[in-house]
Amino acid sequence: MIENPGSNTIELVVNRELCTGCGTCDALCPKNAIKLSIDETKGIYIPRINKDICNNCGFCYDICPGNKVDYEKLNHEIFEKEPENILIGNYQDCYTAYSKDTKIRYNSSSGGLITQLLIYALENGIINGALVTRMNKSKPLEPEPFIARTKEEIIEASKSKYCPVPVNIALKEILKSEKNEKFAVVGLPCHINGIRKAENKNKKLKDKIVLHLGIFCNHMPTFVGTELYLKKLKIKEDEIIRLDYRGEGWPGLMKIITSKHTHTNKLSDYWGFIGSHFFYPKRCLMCGDGVCELADISFGDAWLPKFKDDSTGRSIIVSKSKIGENVLRKMSKESHIELNNVSSIEVIQSQTLMIYLKKKNFTVKKSLLKVYPYSKLLRSDFIDNSIALWFYFNVSLSSNPYFKIIIQYMPLKIIKVYCAIFNKFASKKARKDIKSQYDF
């Protein structure tokens, strides 16, 4: 619970369970009265207000992406039009791509595109630094957003982080930077949405950020998922030296280095637990933006049948703005990346279940959660709402302390089968519904 009784602050957002933990309020509070910290029970970041400093100006509430994002207004401001495609938003073109640097490609999550693009932008003077995230060396289970200013630091921040990340707290460093410095930012939809809202209120921030790179997002697993998975593996947290959630080819491995051993786990094994239906923040249930619609370029895994045997990885990309499109084409022309056109339908095919869950079955969520910050979504039916109710039930169940004990000792195979049955059913519904609008 937030520590300030003000009615015009993010207290309202937190109390209504709308907070995404993005860190925007922490970075831009005019009084520096807000700090993010981990709620150990829920396994997420929440902001806390110093009531002796806060003057209830309401700035934090205005820039909060968890409260509301006006997609219609922001699309007009950023892209000068409303999106024609309700599923992926405005776009210039769509691609699959990968870095031609084999080391970067192999050690990244899906083709190394974001890493390669940031290095290119840095070395060609487009940016002076990039807001990225690495795992904290002194606290290896916690993420550390920072401003990377060298190629080595950018590479250090490669790979996915399947835990809450307060990316936008590092906006403070961008605001403190030298007058003419320019930056790129990398984040999930909630991070990019927060940055776009903050830019509307802070011209200095808007002038300094020239590239917004978005990552496709189904949901952000809580810290509880990783915590319980480590217990299943009988790995003590205080013995962990380093944890990588992805890397070493595609779809990649989780690597846990301890003072005694090195443990590796396939994505299909650990994601079946950490990424299961149980470790969702409730706010993720209300998100209608899976492909980061307000980014300049959005990136995801190319989950398409024709790439199932690709062991080194490639990204599927939605180029959304002119600056994003120009950077990609220059990188391709100069042979830094392999860039191939795909249709918007193939983007949707590669992320069908995620897009379906983001764009449908919200009627029941609105009823259960009492709030709903999005509009212009696909109409839901009884089956869609039943699927939403199933998700809500699982998420609510996972917050029960007794259930945490049960799932810790429950065989992983049972959990995977339980989730696989649901995913198969939901995927079938997703393909049927989306196919009715798009011919595939």
Image (spheres, helix red, strand yellow):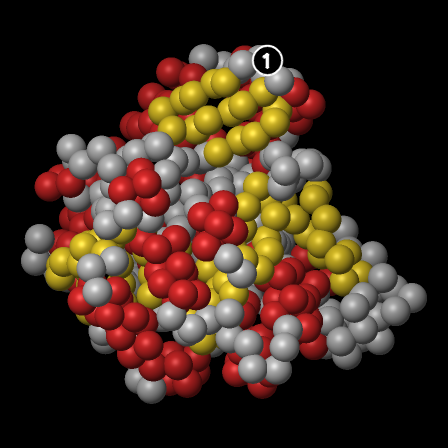
Give the mark count.
Answer: 1
Q: Amino acid at mark 1?
A: Lys
Residue at 52% from the left image edge and 83% from the top image edge: 207
Q: Work out whether residue 367 can be spotted.
A: no
Judge from the rendering whether residue 343 lies leftward or rightward of residue 187; answer left or right. Answer: left
Is residue 388 or residue 289 the one in the foreground?
Answer: 289
Q: Position of residue 417 (x, y in %)?
A: 34, 21
Q: Work out whether residue 424 can be spotted.
A: yes
Check disc 1 and report the residue beneath it: 260
Q: Position of residue 409 (x, y in %)?
A: 54, 13
- Above or below — where is 125 with respect to 282? below
Residue at 38% from the left image edge and 16% from the top image edge: 413
Judge from the rendering whether residue 363 lies leftward or rightward of residue 47; answer left or right. Answer: left
Q: Residues within 10 Å of mark 1 (few under 14, many from 20)?
A: few
Residue at the far left: name it: 439
Using the rendered view, name the quadrant where residue 226 is placed. Answer: top right
Q: Position of residue 310 (x, y in %)?
A: 18, 36
Q: Position of residue 58 (x, y in %)?
A: 72, 76
Is residue 62 or residue 194 the one in the foreground?
Answer: 194
Is residue 373 or residue 408 the one in the foreground?
Answer: 408
Residue at the far right: name it: 52
Residue at 18% from the left image edge and 67% from the top image edge: 333
- Above or below — where is 245 with respect to 415? below
Is residue 263 or residue 282 the one in the foreground?
Answer: 263
Using the rendered view, name the quadrant where residue 137 is placed. Answer: top right
Helix, strand, or loop for circle 1?
A: loop
Residue at 63% from the left image edge and 30% from the top image edge: 400
